[in-house]
Image: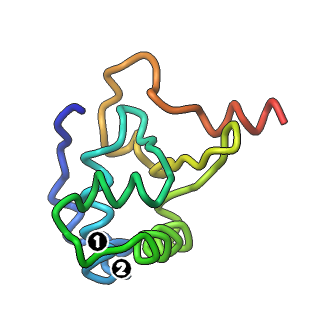
Amino acid sequence: MPNRIIKESICVSESIDLLSWFEEAFFYRLIVNCDDFGRFDGRPAVLKARLFPLKDSIDTNQIDATLASLVKAGMVTVYEYEHKPYLQLLNWGKHQSIRNKRSKYPDPDSIARTC
């Protein structure tokens, strides 16, 4: 995965300020794991393994609840492709450079058009 730049404006973000400390840490760890389009595997077990590999005290129930909080806050959208969950960080293009031409994960917009 490529390196990510987190702008200093995140410190005064009103949406970030509404998150708990754990939700905020989850969000930052998600940023550095997403592909160049802000997409990632949405399965709780995969999120736990990739975002918190050394934290045995964190379980998939916490991952589910935190992801739901980020969705409710309007920071992430969750979608399904071929019966598998994926997620997309919203406003990704405003804050990150897209270097690759293709995403590693399916596009939520193309799924909506084909349904």
Q: Amino acid at mark 2?
A: Leu
Vertical order, 18 against 113 (above or below): below
Left or right of 52 in this view: 79 = right
Q: Residue furthest top?
A: 101
Distance (Cα) linking label 1 and label 2: 6 Å
Q: Position of residue 32 (x, y in %)?
A: 24, 47
Quadrant assignment for the N terminus: top left
Q: Nearer the viewer, residue 41 or 46?
A: 46
What is the count of numbered marks? 2
Q: Nearer the viewer, residue 114 or 9?
A: 114
Quadrant assignment for the C terminus: top right
Q: Residue at x 42, y 16 (%)?
A: 101
* Dot 1 or dot 2, earlier in sequence: 2
Vertical order, 18 against 108 (above or below): below
Q: Amino acid at mark 1?
A: Glu
Left or right of 106 in this view: 55 = left
Q: Residue 48 has which mark?
A: none
Label 1: element kind: helix
Q: Residue at x 69, y 44 (%)?
A: 83
Label 2: element kind: loop
In the rendered image, which residue does mark 2 sit on? 19
Q: Nearer the viewer, residue 104 or 110?
A: 104
Name which quarter of the figure residue 29 lies in. Answer: bottom left
Q: Nearer the viewer, residue 67 or 24?
A: 67
Q: Position of residue 20 (x, y in %)?
A: 32, 83
Q: Residue at x 20, y 41 (%)?
A: 4
Q: Residue at x 46, y 26 (%)?
A: 103
Q: Are marks 1 and 2 in contact (CB under 8 Å)?
A: yes
Name which quarter of the figure residue 94 lies in. Answer: top left
In the rendered image, which residue does mark 1 sit on? 24
Query: How many residues crowd around disc 1 within 10 Å: few (fewer than 14), some, or many (20 or more)?
Result: some
Q: Position of residue 34 (x, y in %)?
A: 35, 42
